[in-house]
Amino acid sequence: MAPAAVADPAAGTHPADRPLLRGTMQIGQEGHLWIGGCDTVELARRFGTPLFVYDEALIRTKAREFHAAFRETGCAYEIAFAAKAFCTVAMCQLAAEEGLALDVVSGGELLTALQAGVPASAIHLHGNNKSRVELEFAVSQGIGSIVVDNFDELELLSAVADAAGRTVDVLLRVSPGVEAHTHEYIATGQQDSKFGFDWENGQALEALYDLAQRRQLRCIGLHSHIGSQIFDGSGFVEAIRRVSRLYAEGVGLGLPLRVLNVGGGFGIRYTAADRPEPLRDTLHTVVRAVREAFDALGLPLPVIAIEPGRSLVGEAGTTLYTVGSRKRIPGVRNYVAVDGGMTDNPRLALYGAQYEAILANRALDEANGCWSVAGKCCESGDMVIWDAPLPDPQPGDVLAVFCTGAYNYSMASHYNRNPVPAVVFVRDGEAALVVERETWGDLLRQDRPLRRGSR
């Protein structure tokens, strides 16, 4: 049940020292963090830690914000959830319930979406190195479209489609030569990228000519994606200008183009220092840029497609950990270790991601020092947060790390043979276990002993 009354989370503390509360988060008078009407301390006791907790209502709210912003523009549109951000059966079900298509990047994600009951026609397959098996699976299921990434894939997909006796709808992925202002590891639209046909050197145009000759592949649109954690629409504008000119070339070749997919990458607030512009403003900028570009070219407005992932689920996810050991190095740093780390959140180690956290069982206690949150893996780089303001953490405290809904569960590993945590969705005071916690025994399921026959 929800807390009877909610205390002011900022009472007695400078606002800048308090992490942002999101969605349905509240702090009860007993000093516990509540999400979706559920006490996170009780969730940790019931399901164990580390634990991924998702605010279901917040995910649905975000999805509806995307729909509302597009409807205001009056354009035809499609929103596809980028499943790589967080792919489970329950999440795919939720996305479909909210009128979203699914963008998948592997056979495993495709199978998950199908298992969730997502219509095959609402699924799109991405990837820069799709295997023949993955392409055969996608074609056999009759998915909505395949986003072709390179010339080798054109040949392979043509052969697969021909063998299946099917015509396959495809989008051509274009690397538009536009650099997003984000970390180099999550920028994808620049010329030096493993993704897509290069716009600047003419590869993309060459690919359109190639597609015009292939009877098995029906090119219905162009796709570009400039990166992730993007805070304004300016990069999209330039990419749209470039790709729209290529679109006009495709129309001139007689290709049945009708979709312009501008990708995703819409940023979120991981910390109070992040300042993404309102989602509505970014989407209106995108639509305005498409209208202007296509009007100038004398082309009818296409279906405008986007692929949000992080912006749908990132802020809705919170990871709960149990505090273990501590280490104080006077004049240097204080460390507090938790029962997870880079095995459930590798993002700091990968590209310096930043997070905010509170003690979920002492959420009203004022921070009186900085503690660096360390994981339990045998790596010096296994850190979750550097220098988090916290009240003195004690063994057994529950630490809540915010904004871990995207690329955390999906990147979880078995390093040091640590099991993958459980996932719960919380809403209206109810907690639904949607992914069971792995056990040590689960880690051995695929292992086989070494057997040597006699010589």
Image: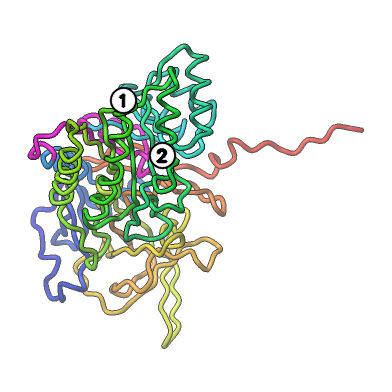
x, y percent for residue 431: 25, 41
Residue 401 vs 169, above or below: the answer is below
- Determine which of the numbered discs, if any, sits on residue 204 in the image: 2
Apparent side of residue 409 relative to residue 431 in the rendered image (left or right): right
- Determine which of the numbered discs, if any, sits on residue 327 in the image: none
In the displayed image of the protein, which residue is found farthest to the top?
165
- Asked where in the image residue 245 lies, by quadrant, the reply is top left
Q: Are marks 2 and 1 in contact (CB under 8 Å)?
A: no
Residue 73 vs 328, above or below: the answer is above
Q: Tell me the quadrant of the picture where the C terminus can be found.
A: top right
Circle 1 residue:
118
Name the residue type under label 1: Val
Which element is circle 1 on? Answer: loop
Pick whichever, 191 or 330, lies toward us: 191
Residue 438 vs 145, above or below: the answer is below
The structure residue drawn at horizontal position 20% and vertical position 53%, both measured from the top left corner, is: 34
Q: Which tag, 2 or 1, sits closer to the chain's start?
A: 1
What residue span does the magenta drawing correspond to? 70-99
The structure residue drawn at horizontal position 25% and vertical position 36%, both measured from the top left corner, is: 305
Name the residue type under label 2: Ala
